Amino acid sequence: MLQSIKQQPFRAAVLMLVWGWLLFLVLAPNMLVVGASVMTRDPSTFISLPLNLDAYRQLFNPLYLDVFLHSLYMAAMTTLVCLLIGYPFAWALSHVGKRRQTLLIFLLIVPFWTNSLVRTYALKLILATNGLLNSALMSLGVIDEPARLLYTEGAVIIGLVYLLLPFMILPLYSVFEDLRQDVLLASHDLGAGRLATFKNVIVPLTLPGVLAGVMLVLLPAMGLFFVPDILGGSRNLLVGNVIKNQFLDARNWPFGAAASIVLTLTMALLIFAHRLSKRHLGEEGA
C-alpha cells in the first residue's frame, strides 16, 4: 500500500510530461498549420485575415493534382519494391540462427546512424554519369558509354527504397517471428503444398505486418522532398517538394499549410484503415 502511494506522484509526473509533450509539440503546431491553411496570403507578413478556403481550392488545380498523382505513383512503386525485397528478406531473417539474426538486424539498423541526407548524397555519387556504378559497368564491358541513371524517376525510387526499406522489413520480421510453426505443420499434414500453404496460411497471418510496412513506407515516401531534389531533378517532384517550395520559395504559407494538412489526413486515413483491417482479421481469427 505504501509503495503504491509513493508511485502515484511519479505516475502523475510521467503523465503530465507525456500530455505536455503531446499538447505543446504535437497538437499546438498542427493547430497552427490548420489556422494558417485557412488564412490569406500576405507578401509582408506571410499570412493575414480574412479567413477563407482559397488554399484548399488551389489544391484542385490540375498542375498540383498531377504532382499529387505522380507522387502517389512514386510512393506506391517504392512501397511495392520494398515489399518485394522485404518480404523474403524478413522470412529468411526469421529462419536463421540467433547469432546471425542479431548480426543481420544490426547491419539493417546501422545505416540509421548516418544522416539520411548524407546517405542520399553518397547514392548520388554512385549513380552519377561518372559515378561508381557506371565506371564498374564500363570496366566490365557491360556498357560502352555511361548510362543516364541520375535525375530520373528510377533514381528517385532507388533512393526512396534505400532509405525506407528497413521500415518494411522490421514489421514483417516481427510477424514472421510470431508465426506459429504448428499451424504450418498442420497445413502440410492436411495435404496442402507449399504454394497453397503460402497463399492460404502464411499470407493471411502476415498481413498485419504487410499493412504496417505499407503504412510506414507509403506516406513518408511522399514527403521526403530532399530525395527528388538530389536524385530526381525538377521533373520528379513529390508532395513534400511542393510543401517545401511553397513555404521557402513561393512564400505561400496558406497553400503549403493546406497541402500539409491533406498529407496528414491521408496518413490518418491509412492508420484508421490499418486498425480496421487488424480488427477484421482478429474477428476472423476468433
Image (cartoon, grey):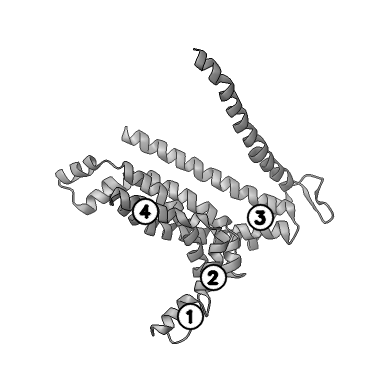
Q: CA distance from mark 1 to mark 4?
A: 35 Å
Q: Nearer the viewer, residue 239 or 249?
A: 249
Residue 234, percent across and down? 62, 69
Q: Alpha-carbon neighbours of circle 2 within 10 Å: few (<14), some, or many (≥20)?
A: many
Residue 108 falls left or right of residue 248? left
Query: Which comes before the other along the chain, label 3 or label 2?
Result: 3
Could you tell me which residue is drawn at 44 percent across and 49 percent down? 213
Could you tell me which residue is drawn at 44 percent across and 46 percent down? 212
Residue 101 falls left or right of residue 148? left
Q: Amino acid at mark 3?
A: Leu
Q: Would you name the residue on which mark 3 appears?
A: 59
Could you tell me which residue is drawn at 50 percent across and 54 percent down? 112
Q: CA distance from mark 3 to mark 1?
A: 37 Å
The circle drawn on residue 124 is 2
Residue 258, percent across and down? 67, 50
Q: Would you name the residue on which mark 4 appears?
A: 103
Query: Which comes before the other along the chain, label 2 or label 4?
Result: 4
Q: Are discs 2 and 4 less than 8 Å apart at CB? A: no
Residue 185, percent across and down? 19, 43
Q: Is residue 153 among the parts visible in the rendering?
A: no
Residue with the most extreme top position: 1
Query: Which comes before the other along the chain, label 2 or label 1?
Result: 2
Q: Nearer the viewer, residue 268 or 15?
A: 15
Q: Are discs 2 and 1 less than 8 Å apart at CB? A: no
- Hey, which quadrant is residue 18 in on the image? top right
